[in-house]
Image (cartoon, rainbow, N blue to C red):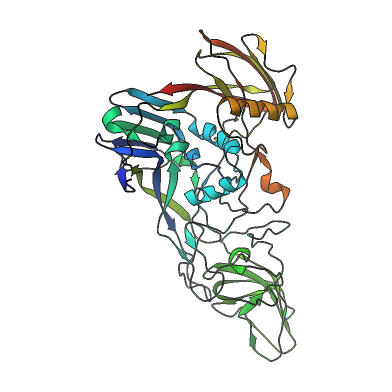
Amino acid sequence: MSNSYVKISANQQQFSDNLNLVDFTIPEGMTVDLSKSKVLVNVVPSITQPTANLPGDDGRACAFEVGFQVEDGASKDLNPPTSAVLVREAFIKGSKIGQIENLRRVDILRTGLAQYEKDIDEKRSNWKNCLKPVSAGLSARASCNVNYVNTGTTLSTALPSTDISIPLNEVFDVCNAEAYSTDKYGQTQIHLRMNFENLKIVSLNTEEADAVAPVMDSGTFGAFTTITATADNTAITSATSNKATNDPETQFPFYVGQRVVCNVTLAGGGAVDRFRRIESISYNSTTGFSTINFTDSLGSINDTQTCVFNSVKPAPSGGLAYSIDNVQLELKLTDESPPDNIQYSTYSTEEDSFANITEKIKTYQVEAEADNLLLALTNGSIYPRNQVDKYRIRVNNMEMSNNDVNINTPEHYDNINKLFLNMDLELKDISEKAINQNKTKKKNTDLDQTLALIGTPLPITQNMKSVNIKTSKANSNTLVLFKRMIKTI
C-alpha cells in the first residue's frame, strides 16, 4: 500500500481575518485515504522584542508561547476538543456526482459531538494539532511551537512557523472513507469558510496567576528563598525556589531565555522591580528545588543584609501578531481499490435567534429522511456552551419524555445514550465539561465550562416532521438545529 502524501495549495493566496475563504481542487486520477488527510494552516508569528535598555535585557529572542486559541465569544480559555472548530462552513462536491456535503456551523457541531465522542485523553491530545488555548490569565507551557529548556544553559527556541492541523474526517463525515477515487467521483472541490478572526496568539511573558498554583503556572509558583549575605558587596545573580518539583522539565514554570520581572527588597529598603532574562537553570534532585540564574545582577547587599524575593513573574513583552502564510491540503495516497459506494452521515442546519428569555417554545419542520436531531444553545458563540437547564421535545405530537428533562439527571444521560446509539457513534465521555488550558486536573475549575448538545432520535417518515422544542435557560438567544441524514455516493 502506498504511504506517500501529496500537498495541494489552496486556490487563494492571501488569508486574514477578513480573507477567510479556502478552496481546494483535487484533480482526477487520484485515490486517497481521506480518513488520514488533513488541512494545514501555516501560521507565522511576529514578536516585537522589548527595547534593550535595562541591565541583562539585551533584546535577544527568547522562547515565546506561540500557541493558538479559538476563543468562544466570551474569552473563556477552553481547550478545543477538535481543531475543526476553526471551520465555520464546509462544502465538498465531485464533478461527476455533484454535492456531497454542505455543512453550516461546523464549529458548533463538531465541538459538541467531540465532547461526547472523545475521552479526556483524546481531548488533551488535540494539542498535537497546535490549536491549543493560551491566554494572559493562565498558560500551560507545553507547546508544539516552542522547544522549552528548563534545566541547563541552552536557550529555549521557538519555531519560525507552525501548522494548525485539521483532520478532514473531523469536518466531513464522508472523509472517513479510506479509498476515495476522483476517477470515480470526478474532480473534487472543497470549500471552507474559516474562523480566522478568532485565532489569537500570546506569549508566556505575561503575569499569570492562580490561587492554588497549578504546576504549569509561574504566577504564584511558591516563594523564592531569601538570600542573606555573608560578605560585603554580594551580587544577587540567582534565585532558588522553595517549592519542590519531581520533574522540572514539566513542573517548573520558568525556562532558559525567559524575560522575567523580579520584585525584590534589597537590604531592608523598599521593594523594586528588576527586569532580567534567565541565563540558566539548575535543579537539585535531592531537595527538588530549582535555581534560576540571571543575565545580570539584581543588585548588591553587604554582610548580614538580605535580599527578599517578593515575586518572580514572566515580564510583559512587546506586541504579538501573526500572519497566515499558506493553507494546504495534505492527502494520503492509497493503493486500495475504492468501494462500490460510500455511506456517510451529513447534516442540514437551521439557526434561530430570539429575544433573551428564559423559556423558549417553538415548532420546527424537519426533513422526512432525518433520523436524529441535535440542538445547541450558543448565544452567538462558536461553542455550544450555554447548555439548557431543562428541555422537552415532541415529534409529530408524540412526547419524547414524560415531563421536562433536567440536565445532569439520569434521564438526560439516558437520552444522550439513546441519541448516540441511534447515530451509531461511540459515547466515551458524558461529563459534558470542557477542559481548560491546564493539562492536569488540579482543581474543579479545570473542568468548569459546560459544552454540550441535546437531541433526540427521529422516526423516518414519508413527509416533513413537526418537532416542537421547549428549552429553559436564562438569557438564551440562539438555538442551532442539526438534522442528521444518511447519504450514499
Relative placement, left or right, of 157 versus 434 is left
Q: Tell which of 100 and 14 is nearer to you.
A: 100
Quadrant of residue 337 in the image? top left
Q: Which residue lies at the image location 42% right of the left edge and 60% below the top edge?
A: 159
Q: Tell which of 132 and 175 is nearer to you.
A: 175
Q: Which residue lies at the image location 64% right of the left edge and 39% below the top edge?
A: 429
Residue 191 against residue 366 in the figure, above or below:
below
Q: Tell which of 238 and 427 is nearer to you.
A: 427
Q: Where is residue 114 in the image (x, y as percent from the top left)?
A: 56, 37
Q: Which residue lies at the image location 59% right of the left edge and 56% below the top edge?
A: 140
Quadrant of residue 404 in the image? top right
Is residue 253 in sight in this rendering? yes
Q: Position of residue 242 (x, y in %)?
A: 71, 72
Relative placement, left or right, of 55 versus 438 is left
**Quadrant (top left/top right/bottom left/bottom right) for the N terminus:** top left
Single out the residue that lies furthest toward the bottom.
231
**Quadrant (top left/top right/bottom left/bottom right) for the C terminus:** top left
Residue 464 against residue 159 in the figure, above or below:
above
Relative placement, left or right, of 419 versus 9 is right
Q: Where is residue 14 in the image (x, y as percent from the top left)?
A: 33, 43
Residue 383 against residue 242 in the figure, above or below:
above
Please state the total of marks drawn on the protein image: 0
Q: Which residue lies at the image location 56% right of the left edge and 51% below the top edge?
A: 134
Q: Where is residue 401 in the image (x, y as percent from the top left)?
A: 71, 18
Q: Tell which of 169 and 453 is nearer to you.
A: 169
Is residue 349 in sight in this rendering? no
